[in-house]
Amino acid sequence: MISPARVAALTALSDVNARRHDLPAAIARVRPGLKDERDRALATDLVTGALRWQQELDYLIEHFAKRPLAKLDFEVLQILRLGAYQLIHLDRIPASAAVNDAVAQTRRAKKTSAAGLVNAVLRAIAASKGKGALPLPDKTDELAYLEVALSHPRWLAERWLRRLGFADTEARETFNNTASPLTIRVNRLKTEPQALVDALAKLGVDVVPARYAPDAFVVTSGNPLRTPLAHSGMFFLQDEASQLVSLLGAVKPGMRVLDTCASPGGKTTAMAASAGDRAEIVAADVRAARVQLLRDTVRTSGAHSIRIVQADLEAGLPFGAIFDLVFVDAPCSGLGTIRRDPDIRWRRTESDLPGLAGAQNQMIRNAARVVAPGGTLVYSTCSSEPEENEAVVTAFVAGDPSFGPIDLHAELRGGRSPHLAPLEPVLDPAGFLRTLPERHGLEAFFGAVLRRVK
């Protein structure tokens, strides 16, 4: 009998690779059918891991099948990917069990004629563990190693190799191939850090302070989402890099703030907490489902200073120039978060970047129109690519001389912004926030602060 986790994993992986759903949606779709939490964990691991290592797995499948992937049936290819991932990367699953399950799944999918091929390919992979077949980090073909052995799309590996050099590209890709830790943010509107740490410890959950963000904790054992505190609003799941971006706003009591692309609400509620719930914050997003998610987060946080509206930043905002701070956490390629969402590396192409940058340029211009004289505009993305980051900021400033970028190094040296001190290690030479996986051990986020002259 095929385990329920493997059946669910095949459904989810097929949905992602057929472009029916992204990874989070595909996993959410199959989880309700798995009653055992261990099955849910295994299914998630199988799908995430198979996507993370897909280029490596495909290379091995093609090598041992002795035929191009295009000649393989779509569903059979997904079965082979899941089986190969278990054989190469999951030592706790016996090879015989992985092979037998894959053959059984092939027959269950009414692909009986392919059962012999699946059996032969997976047994060959199990015997070799991929050794001797994969490209090595040889200086004669570094790109092949980065693309295949470290499983990244060639166009992206080539970009990073050109921009970062081999050592940093290898380190970045290695980072992207590790599992993301569970990171939470303390909600200071409901508790204090030590009180939360103590409360979680009593429930069998251990956490340690994160490296940079002051309210971030990394879970080292247990799962806070399975405790009575999960929906209390005392903490939220939020990556550390995202928490650092929230600090750029420097929200103080009495400020008028607009968060233009606010859902799911992590940055919005963090800014409300930093002002002690005494700022005037308007949080906006474009789609009704996103607005509802934002509303749920704000309600759980206990914040009373946040008003929620539905608005389309790209089309224009229904406000005058009244805000002391406008935050644009722009929709982007997501290429900075492929450790957490490995399917992004296969869904995105280099040709996507100009269109995304065009939309981002329009968004930052529209956001600038509602910044009050002397006010601040924050632009951020979770992208690693310059077209979506500094290029957008440079083009905007060139077109609107009433705004100028703030060098956050100079702000810190001048003692004007002590709240920025946690950001100092992650500032680049130009004074922008730039988290680098290979240097900081964080997802690749970007943030720039611009001020409108009075």
Image (cartoon, helix red, strand yellow):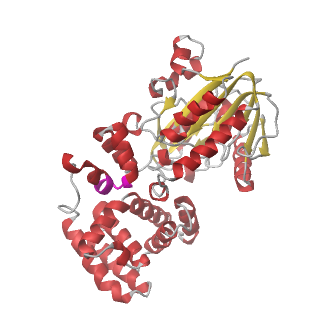
Of residue 163 and residue 261, the one placed in the foreground of this image is: 163
Of residue 241 and residue 75, the one placed in the foreground of this image is: 75
Q: Is residue 319 above or below residue 411?
A: below
> Which corner quadrant of the image does residue 58 belong to?
bottom left
Magenta-highlighted residues: 147-154
Of residue 333 and residue 53, the one placed in the foreground of this image is: 333
Left or right: residue 200 compared with residue 70: right
Q: Is residue 300 above or below residue 393?
A: below
Q: Is residue 386 above or below residue 212?
A: below
> Which corner quadrant of the image does residue 289 belong to?
bottom right
The residue depicted at 78 percent of the width and 40 percent of the height is 317
On whether residue 286 falls in the magenta region, the answer is: no
Q: Quadrant of the N terminus?
A: bottom left
Q: Where residue 79 sits: x, y (%)?
A: 39, 74
The residue depicted at 46 percent of the width and 50 percent of the height is 338
Q: Quadrant of the C terminus?
A: top right
The residue depicted at 61 percent of the width and 41 percent of the height is 235
On whether residue 153 falls in the magenta region, the answer is: yes
Residue furthest toward the front?
A: 399
> Which corner quadrant of the image does residue 429 belong to?
top left
Of residue 138 and residue 181, the one placed in the foreground of this image is: 138
Whether residue 244 is visible: no
Q: Where residue 423 sits: x, y (%)?
A: 51, 26
Q: Where residue 153 sits: x, y (%)?
A: 39, 55
Q: Where residue 147 sits: x, y (%)?
A: 32, 54
The residue depicted at 31 percent of the width and 73 percent of the height is 68
Count of numbered circles in the view: 0
